[in-house]
Image: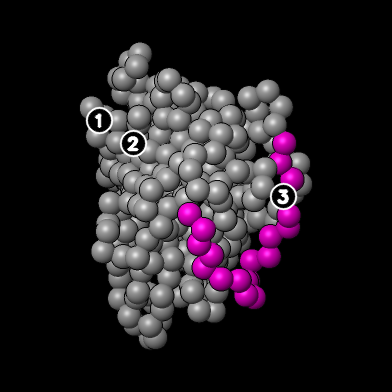
C-alpha cells in the first residue's frame, strides 16, 4: 500500500528512532519522547487451550495487548509495541498509545472490570488531554477460534464536525522471532513464520474508508503520527509491524464504533 494521509504541524514531535536486531531481540537504540503513563504491565491475563491450541493474551490498564501467545509469544519480545492512534485529520493532531510509547496527550485511563482482574466484561476508557475525544475500548475473546475482538468507540466531545483516522497497530514477533514475513490486503494485515504460525489483524467494520499496511521497523520505527508508512507492494520479510486504519466522520457530539480482530493463523 502506498498511501500517505498528509504531513503538517503535528502536536506530537517524534525523534528519529534507530532500530537494530540482536538474535531474537529487538532494541530501541534511540529514545523517543513518551509519556510516563506508557505501560507494558499486564492488568489482566487470559489463558486457554494447550499445545497448538494454546491461547494467552494480556491487557494493560491503558488498553494495549502487551502479550499474545498463540501458541508461542508473538508480541512480548524486545520492544513491546501494540495499541492505537486517533488522528484528528484537521488540524492533523495525533493521540496514540503503543504500550511502550505513548504520546502524552491523554488523560489517565479508567479500567472498568466489575468482577476483578482476568475476568469479563472489561472496558478501558480514555479522554484526550484537550477533551476533544473519548475512546472506549471493550475486549472479548473466542477461545475455540483463538480470536481476540477489540471494539473501539470514539466520541466527538466538541460542537463541530471532525474526521478522524482510527488505527490499530502491532509490532509482531511471531514465535518469538524478530524476522517474519508480513503482507496486507485492503482491510487486513498479517505476519507469519513460514511453515508454522501467524497472526492476522482484521477490520470488522467496513462502513468506513479504510486501509491496511505492513512495513519494516528498521525503516520507520514506531507507527508515525498521522501518516501511513510507505511500503513496497507484496510481502516483506524482516523485523516488521502491521496496522489498519479506518476513516471515521464524527458530527458534533456524535459517536462511532470500529471493531478489530486479532486472529491466530
Q: CA distance from mark 1 to mark 3?
A: 36 Å
- Specify whether 110 is left or right of 139: right
Return the x and y of residue 203 as percentages of the image width and height. 33, 51
- Front residue (pair 101, 193): 193
Q: Which residues are magenta?
A: 1-20
Give the SS element for disc 1. loop
Name, please, the residue furthest toward the top.
Answer: 51
> Which residue carries the number 3 mark?
17
Identify the residue at horizontal 60%, vertical 34% (top origin): 238
- Specify whether 154 is left or right of 5: left
> Which residue carries the number 1 mark?
145
- Front residue (pair 106, 186): 186
Q: Residue 228 in magenta?
A: no
Return the x and y of residue 120 as percentages of the image width and height. 28, 40
Give the SS element for disc 2. strand
Q: Earlier in the sequence, mark 1 or mark 3?
A: 3
Q: Residue 162: which quarter of the image? A: bottom left
Contact (CB < 8 A) between labels 1 and 2?
Answer: yes
Contact (CB < 8 A) between labels 3 and 2?
Answer: no
Within 10 Å of the Cα at label 3, are there few (<14), some (14-19), or many (20+) other Cα atoms? some
- Front residue (pair 109, 191): 191
Identify the residue at horizontal 38%, vertical 38% (top origin): 200
Q: Earlier in the sequence, mark 3 or mark 2?
A: 3
Q: Which mark is residue 263?
A: 2
Identify the residue at horizontal 68%, vertical 65% (top origin): 13
Return the x and y of residue 141 as percentages of the image width and height. 28, 37
Q: Earlier in the sequence, mark 1 or mark 2?
A: 1
Amino acid at each position: 500500500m502506498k498511501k500517505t494521509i498528509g504531513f503538517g504541524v503535528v502536536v506530537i514531535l517524534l525523534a528519529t528512532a534507530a532500530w537494530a536486531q540482536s538474535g531474537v531481540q529487538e532494541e530501541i537504540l534511540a529514545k523517543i519522547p513518551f509519556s510516563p503513563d506508557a505501560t507494558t504491565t499486564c492488568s489482566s491475563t487470559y489463558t486457554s487451550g494447550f499445545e497448538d491450541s494454546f491461547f494467552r493474551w494480556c491487557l494493560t490498564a491503558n488498553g494495549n495487548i502487551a502479550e499474545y501467545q498463540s501458541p508461542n509469544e508473538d508480541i512480548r519480545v524486545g520492544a513491546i509495541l501494540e495499541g492505537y492512534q486517533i488522528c484528528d485529520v484537521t488540524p492533523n493532531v495525533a493521540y496514540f498509545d503503543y504500550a511502550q510509547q505513548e504520546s502524552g496527550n491523554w488523560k489517565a485511563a479508567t479500567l472498568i472490570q466489575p468482577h476483578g482482574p482476568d475476568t469479563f466484561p472489561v472496558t478501558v476508557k480514555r479522554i484526550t488531554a484537550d477533551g476533544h475525544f473519548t475512546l472506549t475500548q471493550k475486549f472479548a475473546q473466542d477461545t475455540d477460534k483463538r480470536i481476540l475482538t477489540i471494539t473501539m468507540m470514539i466520541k466527538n466531545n466538541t460542537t463541530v464536525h471532525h474526521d478522524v483516522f482510527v488505527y490499530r497497530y502491532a509490532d509482531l514477533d511471531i514465535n518469538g522471532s524478530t524476522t517474519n514475513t508480513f503482507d496486507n490486503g485492503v482491510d487486513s494485515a498479517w505476519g507469519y513464520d513460514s511453515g508454522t504460525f501467524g497472526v492476522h489483524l482484521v477490520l470488522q467494520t467496513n462502513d468506513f474508508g479504510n486501509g491496511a499496511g505492513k512495513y519494516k521497523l528498521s525503516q520507520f520505527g514506531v507507527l508515525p503520527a498521522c501518516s501511513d508508512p510507505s511500503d513496497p507492494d507484496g510481502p516483506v520479510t524482516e523485523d516488521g509491524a502491521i496496522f489498519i486504519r479506518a476513516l471515521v466522520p464524527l458530527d458534533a457530539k456524535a459517536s462511532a464504533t470500529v471493531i478489530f480482530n486479532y486472529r491466530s493463523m
